[in-house]
């Protein structure tokens, strides 16, 4: 087949496949009812149809039209790749890489196609790019097309990446084409790709770096707090394990927004195993366990932590899910006698009344890092009360409890050794242990001697019984298992040494193998032997790797097979094996044998990662070292690759010259030119990796070389983008804390300026926040969790803070009376803050709610009587104690003298302390004293904050008077001994560190340091031309010497914040600090070297070492950053970073220029009298010096003067370091190459570092704006989706735009809460809103302290004109102050009252809520302050006058306030991307235009002085182009994009200097450009990155808790749907946080129709419905997802907003389908604790509205008519069979097979739920839960563990059948029959009857037993036990009543139930009455009790082993019960003992 036929066939197949793809997409779109047609989708399909139009066009140039059509099809993959964020690769590195790889490929291919067409159109220009005589000789057309395409791709590719084109353009059109290609590549590669990829990588790196940052703060805090080393090591171990095991994730931010059904399923899956291990929980229903899972928590323990302490109350069930625990002996509470591993359940009967809450007999502690699931007994009983009434779950719990009691009693009854051996379960446990201890295996070895023996005994996984408490059996510091085969410790010293050795060996191999195989002629025998040794070591390393116990749980025995199988599955193992096997030993001539060992290089970086994890403090340095090593190794290996290809592929092995192509010549290898080839290869590699330039050999003349070069360029592009992106992400996350802190400071500053805060107060506030950086690095400011120890176990945290703070807190007298644990608790609640001098900490007349304790610093006490200082407070002093405890106004004023660190303890944390009798009596005694009444009198504050006086520049010692000792000045010198003579040298003054003089001197010193960095690198040769530089050098050195002397006299603040200013102390402090660095930076080291004198003509040769020794002055640059600190707040932070980078960058360039100069020439000079002459001689390099070879590059002689030489060298260094790469000069010796290689590496690091810092700054600056705009976009999309009124949408958008203008998206309360100093915070509040409060009539005469308290509680709201703030009949709970504007109060009789500024309205009554009878509307733009009425009343309750005045205004409901805020001048409606692009389009063209004009102006000046000497003319004297403007713009843009072409170059000195400066400035401007581009990407991806970080956190949470795979997949699918549907939110954030008036208006428009169409609410008042809709919550569901499960209690009703929901029931084969607008669960939403009798599963993707009864129940109190209407509709609906789980009659029935597949139901009684009835009826029917089951619930539950969580439950209808059969029998007969059936199924003999009886106990009903029943029941084996336990069970009822109020009052009348029951026919009242009459309560008379019972014998003295074993909760079997007959007296004594036990108080009940 001919070529064109193949192409046509391929084209036809391509069109067919694309058409099929488009049709499939269209069909999918049409078939999906949830999708909507938008403009983009329609346009996409139209474009697809248009792309087939080329088949119908008949034109000679159809191929061009066809090509355009095919290019239009690129929109499909483009759209798909850009939607990866919403689908499978959301926000991932792979997805981002694919996006930009695709874009990169398409743009390059596009430019290649354009290039080929331009080549055809302009044939006269083709030869300028690819000369025809040198083209590859290709004859056939196919090869010619391929050759042209490859050559065009080669040229375009080099332009696209900023490396420079192969050839230069020859006219203006080509220059413009070049610019388009280069600018496009600059935007895509360096800009978008690097910026976007770095941001994505930072999302993955952020959790780790955030944890590391907090870990460093924790270690620093403990070190500064003098925490003992043991406790410090304990905390360090915890956090290392916490990160290693759980990645520091113990909670997730996404779970709270999930639907309750999904969250419950996740928690149930997490804690399901724990519930199945617990004996009392394993038989309960799935719904009951799901409810329990909500209340369970996970706790982490550090090795040595006490999990259960001896004598503590056992109040929790604890399941060990990870780690080992130890049981300690009771003798010393330190010796371990038993070790248990994960899976063990502790105190599984905790919480049982009387016995379960007893004290623990032994202590159990964590042996390793442990994780435990904990269920507290109070949560268990709450769930029992909620779920245990209907289905008998509570009876099951109690039955299990009593079964355990019986075993305990049997243990006491048969405690004699001969009896106990067979009867007691506890001693049975000990007998098993003894048996296992003596048992042996087949080899005769003891089983417990093996480390892999784990035994399950009595619910505990026993590892080994031994007397020590070591962490791992037979383990040491090296091995986990020392016997062969050994298992090595993963972090042992041997592993560290071995990995270090192997890593060094790998790096050595990566250097030596390419060196000997590529650069050497022959591979020596010694190298082969070395290679074999390396192979052996690599093999040993593989065995070490396989035998290392990585990811092994602590304490779990392991074997070599286990570790090997785990390590082999690692993704790196295959690569290590390939790097070890001798693969190339059998390939070819074995020359490259061993080259595959380079594949082991990734192991080095893995080892560095491990070291980085261990060395937290130096992790950043290690990470920087890793990236630098990667860059260097990449350069070296790329150089070896180039040498290998050139030699072994093309035959060109030697490098003959460095200056012009071909650089490699066709010669064989030799050993003499190895250094030359190696240096040139490294220079070539670093040039191409850094995109500086490409040193071509043949260019495009050799087609094979073209393909090879394209391949190398692709590798370098990927490597460059990856290294820069990862390095950028690293710097971004490491500086995130500082950037967030700076951003917070900036936001606070803007807020204070916007609110017109007084400058002094603003400075105070910002000063306080700046001090926060020195306390905790601003962590409390930038994180929601204010404590850095938030995830530390509470007891460990209390130990840490107690050790530091107790010595301060115990200074408060009454704290010494507290218990140790209470003291720890209070210490942990204390807040530490730092304040500045002159701050008022406690003001006279204020009501103090805190106790203050000074940690550091000095305060003074001022008396209101004397107005002077009466006392001074130092460290450990306290104040405000009596004021806080006695609630009296403050008498004294406390003011800070120095910087003070203070602990504050809030009064709310002292409640328990005040209740101590001794303290309470003391407080009462104080209140009885006569002084108490006087202290209650409030005094006006007499002082306020006074700004400190201007700090003097000096601190002087006065001269002593006559006969006065001069001790203040002379005494410190006496301690110096022989150096006391210094008192005659030092002056009597010092310089204050905070004076303005020192600030000016710092600027002067920084300027001198910068001048030194500019002067000294070229001083040795420039001074020959300008001798005056010597005077400047002397002056700079003199300033350095003077600075040293001056710094000896600079004072400092010591650790106690006290200024030290004595000369002796300041000099000693400076000498111990920076003295050596300053001294080294000014020493004239050049004096150690002299110039060499030549014999010829008496010349001196300048010694290079002399110049190098002068570089010590560069150390002075460390003073520059401290001087630039004064620019903070004056200059933009990104510009400030550019300013900081400028001196460092220039210094590096000068140093490199110095090295290039001395590596290029020899400088001679003569000294003739007073004049100098010089002579510059280029180096005699092989092939000539670059100065000689490239002398035509400049139009001035570089050897003419030192300045010309320096300038020319500087230009070369600049364009190499900035990676501009004009490629004009080439190095001619190895030394120059080394300098340039170093310069390029340093340049990459500096530019990358500062670029990333700018990126992080720019991304933080607009974070608030981006977040606010995202929220606005969410609510706009929501309103459009719900099709709200356009006028309402416009009103909502206008409101939020106005709110942004006023607040800038910042809540003022969050800003003010950053300040922990209460007085400073309230000062700011009073300044902002104080005048408003004082204009209110009830507050105008009040104390300032009241205004301070009110100001801390108010919230701020802004409203537009004509906004209804309160509708008539709205239920409100707040009070409003009008701060600005006017509001209109409209009465019911159309009368209106206008409230001017200073009004007060709202809920002024004492009720929590009121129904407001008026409507409030704003008549102008208004600002309101809102405060909860209950909070307001509680505040003013201590101010009787204000309270009395308020009561006088209550009839009017209005009272007055005022404050005006300035308008914010930032518009939220503008698009941030558009604004940034607009800003860039303004400053960037302006920058280019200015530079273009300057560039041309310099040329014009040069032309005026000397024609044809400027850059305008080439070396032939011809002009470069017709338009100088285009040429100038072309040169400026190529320089800015760092893509120097090298055609237009500077020629004269002025031009060279300008271009050198232009390159440096371009680099800095390019940083800002990348920052702006990153800002755009951050803005566009702000929400996706934020949600993705939450999703990663959720994944880690699910992984840590071992959630099943099916559930993880379901959670991921739901999270993805939630992101795609609503961007990760259920409702828009602005809707949930909107003011109530706006929220009700939006939700009414969206959801009110659901309530009006509901039969329950159709007759309710409109005002009631309008407010009821505000309580509705919307949840999004995916298909086949539970909304509510059968048997679940949610107290909610549900309304389907969109989608469809299926109703299923276990005992019914039919299903019902609910459509949008229908509802279900009305009765469950109207009555508490009513379970659902059916399950509801979504059939499609749905949105369901949920209405919780607890939310809106109080609303009915204000709307009695609506309450009556609901009740009436319930009655009507009941008559119409609307009952229980019901809906409208429109629900359709569907076959059962339409429902998704069902999983087994785990609940034992899920099919027996009756419709909601009267509470007593439901208690009566709960006896049905005792019916037998066909299938074991435990088996069913275990079978369904790994099933998808959304499967419905399988039906078990046997119970229902039995229920229907027994419906006509009396309740007692049915119960007895069920009990007998239950006993026939081999159930526990006492469980059934006890469960029935206990169920009646829970229901508060009397137990009835007649005589015949007693006779029948006596025949059962368990009757006597049941009778003896009746009193004990009655105590259960009392216990439950103490814990929770079970019966919640219903708002429905009781008569509803009786009527409902009668009407439905479920159960007649007569049946109810018969059931009640047949019951008789058991009397308390002990004589009526049976005499056959068990007795609790007196407890005898037990042995130690028996006491220890008694504490174990073991349930191994159910033994037969032996009856023992006892006398009535014995029974009576037992009953008395039981009654006493019942009366034991429960300590938890008091809480």
Image: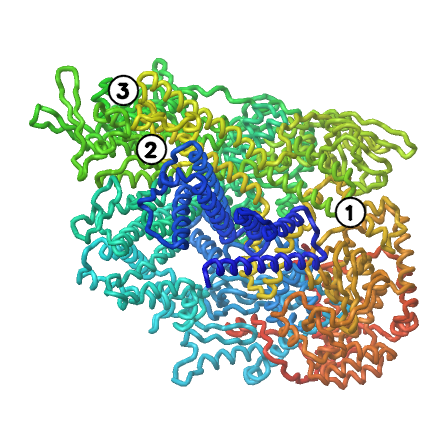
Residue 1862 placement, left or right of 567: right
Residue 1296 coordinates in the image, percent (x, y): 69, 36
Of the image marks 2 and 1, the number of the one nearer the N terminus: 2
What's the mark number on residue 1032? 3
Q: Residues within 10 Å of mark 2 (few under 14, many from 20)?
A: many
Question: Helix, strand, or loop for circle 2?
Answer: helix
Q: Is residue 2023 visible from the viewing direction of this image?
A: no
Q: Residues within 10 Å of mark 3 (few under 14, many from 20)?
A: some
The reply to whether dot 2 and dot 1 touch (C-beta < 8 Å) is: no
Q: Report the residue at 90% width, 52% height from top.
A: 1765
Question: Helix, strand, or loop for circle 3?
Answer: helix
Of the image marks 1 and 3, the number of the one nearer the N terminus: 3
Q: Report the residue at 27% width, 47% height from top.
A: 681
Q: Report the residue at 65% width, 66% height from top.
A: 1845
Residue 1758 placement, left or right of 934: right
**In the rendered image, which residue does mark 2 sit on?**
1214
């Amino acid at each position: 087949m001919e070529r064109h036929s193949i192409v046509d066939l391929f084209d036809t197949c391509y069109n067919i496949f694309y058409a099929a793809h488009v049709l499939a997409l269209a069909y999918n779109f049409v078939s999906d009812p949830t999708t909507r047609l938008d403009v983009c989708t329609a346009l996409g399909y139209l474009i697809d149809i248009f792309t087939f139009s080329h088949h119908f066009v008949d034109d000679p140039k159809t191929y061009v039209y066809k090509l355009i059509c095919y290019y239009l099809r690129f929109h499909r993959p483009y759209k798909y790749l850009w939607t990866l964020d919403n689908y499978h690769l959301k926000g991932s590195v792979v997805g981002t890489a694919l996006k930009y790889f695709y874009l990169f490929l398409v743009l390059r291919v596009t430019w290649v196609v354009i290039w080929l067409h331009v080549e055809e159109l302009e044939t006269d220009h083709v030869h300028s790019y690819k000369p025809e005589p040198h083209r590859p000789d290709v004859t056939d057309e196919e090869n010619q097309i391929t050759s042209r395409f490859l050559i065009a791709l080669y040229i375009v590719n080099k332009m696209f990446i900023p490396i420079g084109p192969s050839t230069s353009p020859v006219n203006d059109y080509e220059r413009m084409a070049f610019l388009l290609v280069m600018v496009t590549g600059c935007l895509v590669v360096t800009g978008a790709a690097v910026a976007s990829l770095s941001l994505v990588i930072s999302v993955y790196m952020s959790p780790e770096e955030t944890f590391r940052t907090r870990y460093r703060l924790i270690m620093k805090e403990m070190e500064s707090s003098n925490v003992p080393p043991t406790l410090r090591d304990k905390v360090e171990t915890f956090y290392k394990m916490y990160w290693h095991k759980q990645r520091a994730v113990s909670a997730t931010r996404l779970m709270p927004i999930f639907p309750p059904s999904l969250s419950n399923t996740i928690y149930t899956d997490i804690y399901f195993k724990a519930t199945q291990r617990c004996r009392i929980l394993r038989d309960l229903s799935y719904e009951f366990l799901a409810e329990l899972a909500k209340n369970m928590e996970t706790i982490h323990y550090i090795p040595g932590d006490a999990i259960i302490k001896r004598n503590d109350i056992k109040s929790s069930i604890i399941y060990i899910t990870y780690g080992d625990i130890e049981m300690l002996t009771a003798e010393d509470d330190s010796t371990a006698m038993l070790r248990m591993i994960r899976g063990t359940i502790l105190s599984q009967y905790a919480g049982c009344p009387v016995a379960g809450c007893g004290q623990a007999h032994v202590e159990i502690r964590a042996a390793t890092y442990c994780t435990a699931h904990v269920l507290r007994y109070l949560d268990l009983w709450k769930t029992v009360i909620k779920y245990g009434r209907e289905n008998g779950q509570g009876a099951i719990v109690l039955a299990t409890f009593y079964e355990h009691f019986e075993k305990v009693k049997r243990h006491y009854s048969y405690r004699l050794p001969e009896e106990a051996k067979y009867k007691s379960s506890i001693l049975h446990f000990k007998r098993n242990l003894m048996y296992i201890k003596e048992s042996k295996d087949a080899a005769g070895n003891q089983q417990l001697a093996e480390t892999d023996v784990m035994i399950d005994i009595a619910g505990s996984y026993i590892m080994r019984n031994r007397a020590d408490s070591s962490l791992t059996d037979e383990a040491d510091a090296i091995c986990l298992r020392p016997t062969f085969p050994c298992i090595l410790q993963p972090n042992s010293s041997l592993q560290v040494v071995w990995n270090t050795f192997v890593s060094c060996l790998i790096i050595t191999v990566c250097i030596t193998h390419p060196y000997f195989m590529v650069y050497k002629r022959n591979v020596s025998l010694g190298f082969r032997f070395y290679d074999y040794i390396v192979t052996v070591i690599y093999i040993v390393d593989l065995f070490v790797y396989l035998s290392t116990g990585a990811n092994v749980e602590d304490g779990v025995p392991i074997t070599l097979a286990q570790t090997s199988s785990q390590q082999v599955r690692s993704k790196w193992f295959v690569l290590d094996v390939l790097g070890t096997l001798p693969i190339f030993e059998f390939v070819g001539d074995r020359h490259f044998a061993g080259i595959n060992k380079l594949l082991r290089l990734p192991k080095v970086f893995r080892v560095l990662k491990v070291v980085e994890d261990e060395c937290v403090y130096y992790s950043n340095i290690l990470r920087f070292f890793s990236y630098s090593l990667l860059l260097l190794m990449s350069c070296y290996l790329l150089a070896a690759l180039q040498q290998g290809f050139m030699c072994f592929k093309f035959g060109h092995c030697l490098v003959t010259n460095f200056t012009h192509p071909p650089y490699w010549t066709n010669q064989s290898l030799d050993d003499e030119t190895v250094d030359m080839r190696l240096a040139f290869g490294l220079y070539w590699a670093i040039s191409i990796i850094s995109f500086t330039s490409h040193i071509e050999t043949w260019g495009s003349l050799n087609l094979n070389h073209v393909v090879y070069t394209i391949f190398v360029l692709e590798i370098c592009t990927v490597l460059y983008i990856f290294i820069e992106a990862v390095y950028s992400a690293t710097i971004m996350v490491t500086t995130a804390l500082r950037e967030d802190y700076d951003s917070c400071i900036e936001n606070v500053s803007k807020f204070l300026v916007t609110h017109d805060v007084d400058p002094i107060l603003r400075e105070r506030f910002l000063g306080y926040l700046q001090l926060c950086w020195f306390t905790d690095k601003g962590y409390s400011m930038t994180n929601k969790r204010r404590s850095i120890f938030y995830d530390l176990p509470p007891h460990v945290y209390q130990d840490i803070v107690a050790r530091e703070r107790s010595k301060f807190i115990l200074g408060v007298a009454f704290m010494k009376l507290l218990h140790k644990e209470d003291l720890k608790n209070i210490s942990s609640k204390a807040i530490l803050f730092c304040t500045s001098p002159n701050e008022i900490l406690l003001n006279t007349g204020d009501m103090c709610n805190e106790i203050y304790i000074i940690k550091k610093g000095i305060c003074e006490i001022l008396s209101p009587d004397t107005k002077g200082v009466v006392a001074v407070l130092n460290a450990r002093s306290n104040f405000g104690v009596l004021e806080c405890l006695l609630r009296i106004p403050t008498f004294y004023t406390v003011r800070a003298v120095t910087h003070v660190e203070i602990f504050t303890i809030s009064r709310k944390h002292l409640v328990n302390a005040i209740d101590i009798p001794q303290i309470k009596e003391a407080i009462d005694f104080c209140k009885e004293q006569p002084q108490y009444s006087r202290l209650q009198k409030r005094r006006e504050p007499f002082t306020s904050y006074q700004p400190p006086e201007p700090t003097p520049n000096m601190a002087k010692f006065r001269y002593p008077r006559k006969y006065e000792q001069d001790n203040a000045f002379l005494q410190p010198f006496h301690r110096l001994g022989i150096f006391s003579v210094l008192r005659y040298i030092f002056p009597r003054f010092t310089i204050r560190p905070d004076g303005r003089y020192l600030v000016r001197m710092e600027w002067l010193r920084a300027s001198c340091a910068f001048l030194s960095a500019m002067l000294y690198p070229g001083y040795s040769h420039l001074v020959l031309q300008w001798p005056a530089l010597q005077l400047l050098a002397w002056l700079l050195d003199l300033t350095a010497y003077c600075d040293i002397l001056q710094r000896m006299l600079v004072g400092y603040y010591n650790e106690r914040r006290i200024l030290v200013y004595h000369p002796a102390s300041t000099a000693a402090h400076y000498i111990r600090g920076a003295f050596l660095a300053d001294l080294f930076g000014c020493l004239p080291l050049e004096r150690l070297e002299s110039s060499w004198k030549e014999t010829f003509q008496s010349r001196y040769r300048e010694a290079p070492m002399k110049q190098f020794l002068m570089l010590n002055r560069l150390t002075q640059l460390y003073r520059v950053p401290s001087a630039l600190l004064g620019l903070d707040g004056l200059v933009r932070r990104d510009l400030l970073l550019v300013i900081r980078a400028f001196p460092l960058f220039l210094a590096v360039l000068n140093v490199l220029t110095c090295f290039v100069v001395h590596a290029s020439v020899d400088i001679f000079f003569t000294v003739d009298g007073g004049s100098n002459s010089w002579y510059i001689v280029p180096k005699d390099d092989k092939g000539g010096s670059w100065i000689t070879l490239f002398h035509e590059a400049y139009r001035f002689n570089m050897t003419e003067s030192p300045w010309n030489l320096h300038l020319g060298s500087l230009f070369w260094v600049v364009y190499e370091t900035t990676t501009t790469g004009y490629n004009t000069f080439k190095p001619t010796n190895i030394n120059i190459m080394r300098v340039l290689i170093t310069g390029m590496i340093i340049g990459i690091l500096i530019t990358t570092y500062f670029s990333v810092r700018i990126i992080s700054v720019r991304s933080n600056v607009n974070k608030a704006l981006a977040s606010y705009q995202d929220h606005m976009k969410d609510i706009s999309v929501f309103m459009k989706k719900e099709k709200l009124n356009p006028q309402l949408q416009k009103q909502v958008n206008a409101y939020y735009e106005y709110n942004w203008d006023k607040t800038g998206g910042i809540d003022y309360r969050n800003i003010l809460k950053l300040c922990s100093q209460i007085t400073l915070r309230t000062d700011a509040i009073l300044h902002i809103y104080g005048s408003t409060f004082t204009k209110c009539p009830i507050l105008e005469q009040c104390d300032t302290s009241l205004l301070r308290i009110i100001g801390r509680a108010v919230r701020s709201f802004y409203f537009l004109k004509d906004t209804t703030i309160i509708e008539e009949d709205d239920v409100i709970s707040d009070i409003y102050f009008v701060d600005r504007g006017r509001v209109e109060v409209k009465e019911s009789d159309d009368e209106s009252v206008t409230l001017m500024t200073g009004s007060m309205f709202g809920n002024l009554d004492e009720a929590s809520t009121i129904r407001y009878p008026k409507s409030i509307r704003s008549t102008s733009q208004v600002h309101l302050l809102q405060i909860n009425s209950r909070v307001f009343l509680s505040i003013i309750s201590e101010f009787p006058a204000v309270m009395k005045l308020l009561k006088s205004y209550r009839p009017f409901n209005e009272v007055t306030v005022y404050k005006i805020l300035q308008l914010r001048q930032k518009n939220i409606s503008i698009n941030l991307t558009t604004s940034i692009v607009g800003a860039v389009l303004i400053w960037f063209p302006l920058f280019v235009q200015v530079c273009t004009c300057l560039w041309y102006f310099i040329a014009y000046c040069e032309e005026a002085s000397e024609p044809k000497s400027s850059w305008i003319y080439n070396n032939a004297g011809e002009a470069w182009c017709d338009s100088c403007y285009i040429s100038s713009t072309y040169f400026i843009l190529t320089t800015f994009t760092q893509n120097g072409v090298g055609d237009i170059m500077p020629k004269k000195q002025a031009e060279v200097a300008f271009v050198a400066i232009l390159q440096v400035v371009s680099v800095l401007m390019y940083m800002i450009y990348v920052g702006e581009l990153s800002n755009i990407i951050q803005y566009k991806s702000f929400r996706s990155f934020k949600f993705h970080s939450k999703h990663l956190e959720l994944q880690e949470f699910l992984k840590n808790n071992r959630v099943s795979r099916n559930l993880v997949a379901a959670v991921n699918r739901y999270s993805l749907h939630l992101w795609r549907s609503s961007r990760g939110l259920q409702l828009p954030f602005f809707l949930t946080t909107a003011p109530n008036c706006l929220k009700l208006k939006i939700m009414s428009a969206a959801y009110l129709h659901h309530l009006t169409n509901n039969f329950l609410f159709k007759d309710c008042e409109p005002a009631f419905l309008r407010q009821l809709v505000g309580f509705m919550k919307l949840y999004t569901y995916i298909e086949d997802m539970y909304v509510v499960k059968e048997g679940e209690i949610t107290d909610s009703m549900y309304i389907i907003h969109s989608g469809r929901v299926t109703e299923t029931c276990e005992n019914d084969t039919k299903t019902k389908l609910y459509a949008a607008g229908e509802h279900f669960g009305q009765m469950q939403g109207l009555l508490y604790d009513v379970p659902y009798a059916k399950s509801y599963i979504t059939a499609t993707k749905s949105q369901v509205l949920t209405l919780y009864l607890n939310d809106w129940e109080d609303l009915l109190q204000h709307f009695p008519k609506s309450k009556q209407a609901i009740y009436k509709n319930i009655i009507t609906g009941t008559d119409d069979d609307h009952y229980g789980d019901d809906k409208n009659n429109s629900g359709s029935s569907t076959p059962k097979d339409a429902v998704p597949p069902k999983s087994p139901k785990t609940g034992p009684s899920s099919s027996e739920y009756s419709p909601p009835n009267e509470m007593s009826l439901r208690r009566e029917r709960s006896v049905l839960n005792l019916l037998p089951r066909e299938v074991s619930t435990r088996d069913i539950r275990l079978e369904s563990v790994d099933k998808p969580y959304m499967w419905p439950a399988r039906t078990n209808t046997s119970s229902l059948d039995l229920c229907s059969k027994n419906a006509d029998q009396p309740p007692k007969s049915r119960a007895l029959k069920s009990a007998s059936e239950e006993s026939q199924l081999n159930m526990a003999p006492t469980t059934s009857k006890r469960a029935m009886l206990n169920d009646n106990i829970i229901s508060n009903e009397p137990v009835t037993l007649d005589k015949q029943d007693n006779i029948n029941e006596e025949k059962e084996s368990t009757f006597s036990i049941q009778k003896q336990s009746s009193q004990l069970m009655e105590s259960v009822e009392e216990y439950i009543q103490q814990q929770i109020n079970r019966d919640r009052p219903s708002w429905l009348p009781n008569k509803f139930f009786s009527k409902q029951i009668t009407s439905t026919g479920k159960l007649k009242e007569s049946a109810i009455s018969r059931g009640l009459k047949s019951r008789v309560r058991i009397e308390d008379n002990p004589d009526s009790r049976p005499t056959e019972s068990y007795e609790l014998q007196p407890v005898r003295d037990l042995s130690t082993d028996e006491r220890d074993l008694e504490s174990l909760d073991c349930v191994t079997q159910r033994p037969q019960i032996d009856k023992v007959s006892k006398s009535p007296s014995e029974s009576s004594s037992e009953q008395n003992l039981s009654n006493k036990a019942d009366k034991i108080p429960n300590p938890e009940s008091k809480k």
